[in-house]
Amino acid sequence: MIKKILKLKNVGLYALNPIATCRNWNGEFEKNTIIYGENGTGKTTLSLLLASLKGDNEILKQKSTIGTDGVQEVVIISQDNIKYRYKDGAWQNHFTDIEIFDIHFIEDNVYIGSSLLDSNQVNLFDIVVGKKGLQKQEKLKESYEIKKDWNKMKEVLKARLSSESYLSDEVIKDINEQIEDLNFQIRYWTNYIKQLQLELGEYSKSVFDKDIQLINKYIKIFTPHIQLEKFSKKHAGEKQFVSYSLSVNGEIVDFERKRSATKRSFKYSLSEGDKSAFALAFFLAQLEKIDLKDKIIVFDDPLSSFDQSRRHATTTQLVRISERCKQLFVFTHHIDFAKMLSRKLEKASTVSLKIQKKSHQSIIVLHDIEAETLGDLFKDITVLNDYMSNGVNNELEKREVIRCIRPTIEGIMRIKFFKEIKHDEWLGDMIKKIREASEQDRLYRLQSFLDEIADVNDYSKEFHHCDPTEPSDNIISDEELRSYVGQTLRLIDKI
């Protein structure tokens, strides 16, 4: 489990010491770590950092901070207090038990844009067939290498026969016998390779059939009108390629390199949301096939801008992954999704963090996601309550407290009298309506404390407007402010 980032030098936008500790957070990651950040703050940089830690020294070089000397250094510490250092372009040690779902997983293995390239098909084969299939493929590669060696030896002997005219009959006979022996070996290895290809094909088919069922199980969760129909395997020498076909509402969709009037294409048949849902289903299916108890699982924006309708389903799946894995990292730019996920995960082992811009650098801070996602009315009431309990430190903070008074009364009025108050009417308009209300009007009962509402309005309204001609040395009385805030909170109960 990754405990803490101790140092990030020249990595993306991050400060040298990117962790901002506070009274409620010691800077350590938890079993479940949710990191929220707006686009461009550095979520993907953290994802790539973990991908590099897994075993890719080169990828981190692509995230060197622009405008610096480019010398990068990273220090990460694990739960076991093992330090992982990146220096001089390489990690001194790697943390290999990491699986990452991000745009790079999608583009490397599932599709690029709306295309399934040869490179995708090679990587896709490696993922789908698993460890046993890769062992068979490695055996096949070794057999091809042996056959190539026999062929090279044969070509050397044939070249000698054709270039050396002075060879005796006895030497020629000996060379021909050697060539015949080599032909025997070549035929043997040719047949052996055919047998291995056949075995790998049969094994692949059995794996494909199981994978189709597994992937479709997850596809149905996210987008039930899509189904994976088949995997297709081909090979060119030792290289293995896998492509696939989907159906959309029962109609087959293929990756066609040329447009066809009779065949539907992946590009025009699936929405961006459908594509990302399929990629996530594919990743989740692969996770189900392996033991996750020692794995760190990373999701970089599992919910795209096109997937808002799949928030609940995605949250449920991530919670289930959390129950199986060693550690879960989720990076997202959807604050409501981050909030939903944080509520579903086990509270004691979950931390919500935020990537925050400070000057031109990014830092990671504790995220009070509940407070940040409050509606405006609840935020204003919270500010007023906090002031009554804890006070404030300066004049600027007092002004912020005063500026919450009127919106609080207006918000409560809009909720309680939603039929009587129009959307473009404000506290002054509301006071007028109360004053003019007749006994049969719902607003009439507020006349008994109308003076209190008017007093609060008069006190706070000057802080909602700017008059440059007014003196600027007006100090806000803490005692007076406390009186009006208390009056506002009592009015909430009365209204």
Image (spheres, rainbow, N blue to C red):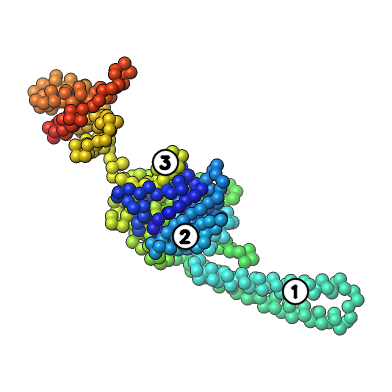
**Residue that protrudes farthest toward the bottom in the picture:** 170
Q: Can residue 284 be seen in this snapshot?
A: no
- Residue 173's spot in the image, x, y percent? 83, 82
Q: In which quarter of the view is residue 325 placed?
A: bottom left
Looking at the rendered image, the quarter that the C terminus falls into is top left
Pick whichever, 281 or 247, lies toward us.
281
Task: Tell me the CA gap for discs 2 and 1.
Answer: 47 Å
SS class, disc 3: strand
* Disc nearest the viewer among 3 and 2: 2
Instruction: Give the labeled residue for mark 2.
Output: 84
Q: Name the amino acid type tagged 1.
A: Met
Looking at the rendered image, the quarter that the N terminus falls into is bottom left
Instruction: Give the labeled residue for mark 3.
Output: 357
Q: In which quarter of the view is residue 153 placed?
A: bottom right
- Residue 424's spot in the image, x, y percent? 27, 24
Task: Say which label, 3 or 2, has the lower sequence index.
Answer: 2
Task: Tell whether 74 sits left or right of 153.
Answer: left
SS class, disc 2: strand
**Residue that protrudes farthest toward the right in the picture:** 166
For the point 58% across and 64% down, the residue is 240
Instruction: Give the labeled residue for mark 1.
Output: 153
SS class, disc 1: helix
Q: Name the amino acid type tagged 3.
A: Lys
Pick whichever, 38 or 437, lies toward us.
38
**Residue that protrudes farthest toward the top in the picture:** 469
Task: Say which label, 2 or 1, has the lower sequence index.
Answer: 2
* Disc nearest the viewer among 2 and 1: 2
Q: Is residue 230 shown above or below 481?
A: below
